[in-house]
Amino acid sequence: ANDDVDESGVLGGGGNLVGVCVHMCPDEELIRRESENGIQTLELPCKDIHPAGWTLRDTAVKRFRRSAADFKLDIPELVRPPHVLERVCGYLEEWVMERDRQGFDPRFGHDTGGGFGFGNGNAKNVKAGTVPPLDVYQFIWDRTRMVRKDFILQNYVGTGGRCNAIAVRCHERIARWHALCEHQLSHLPDFIVMQSQQNIQELGATMKSLNMFYDDAGGRSTL
């Protein structure tokens, strides 16, 4: 068998995994999370915020998950290819990143703030309709971490692996977001105590990947 070509799209050049999931959230995960009541507040479609007709298919984003004995990450149907990952970055920037600054959000219509189950305590004493900024932060942190993971699963690691301009652009956007968070959330004691260290760690990991991409000038100039 030729490992470089597979009619199903599973393998690419050099036997690399090629993701075939065309949605921001794979069908398997979306169905499972719906059945387990695992859809997070920022993923809920809202007629006052989103375009008419949008459903969870348009607003749900694949969440971070590690490989385990009973769950494999490297399944093509669960992995999003670069062009979908870039669409995810654009969606997060346009529809999620600034929700705590964009006025009343009916999805957060309770005085407790309606947290996401991250357990950060950030939903305490929050005015109805106000999105807690740390909830926005942790949502983006989780989803962009999985964006980077999907690139890694497909061997988009720069030097020694694959590289293209989409991978570079996505990592630049994610790094920029981590850097901005370190500045914009520095006035929140809960961020400093509980999130700043992990934010800096993720920024460092993203920058390390970017350096590997930048070193692969030929690969990153192809798209």
Image (cartoon, helix red, strand yellow):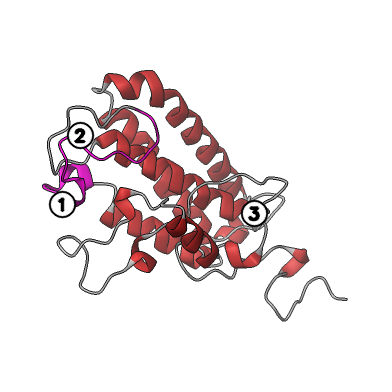
Query: Gap in Å between the C-alphas at discs 2 and 3?
Result: 35 Å
Image quadrant in which the N terminus is located: bottom right
- Looking at the rendered structure, the kind of residue marked 2 is Thr
Q: Quadrant of residue 74?
A: bottom right
Query: Gap in Å between the C-alphas at discs 1 and 2?
Result: 13 Å
Query: Gap in Å between the C-alphas at discs 3 and 1?
Result: 34 Å
* Residue named by callout 3: 73
Which structural element holds mark 1? helix
| Marks 3 and 1, the one that precedes in the sequence | 3
Q: Residue at x 25, y 23 (%)?
A: 188
Q: Nearer the viewer, mark 3 or mark 1?
A: 1
- Looking at the rendered structure, the kind of residue marked 1 is Pro
| Marks 2 and 3, the one that precedes in the sequence | 3
For this orientation, the residue located farthest to the bottom is 7
Q: Nearer the viewer, residue 129 or 87?
A: 129
Q: Residue at x 61, y 57 (%)?
A: 163
Side (left or right) of 69 relative to 24: right
Callouts 1 and 2 close, C-beta under 8 Å = no
Q: Nearer the viewer, mark 1 or mark 2?
A: 2
Q: Callout 1: few (<14), some (14-19), or many (20+) C-alpha neighbours within 10 Å?
A: some
Q: Nearer the viewer, mark 2 or mark 3?
A: 2
Magenta-highlighted residues: 99-120
* Residue named by callout 2: 112
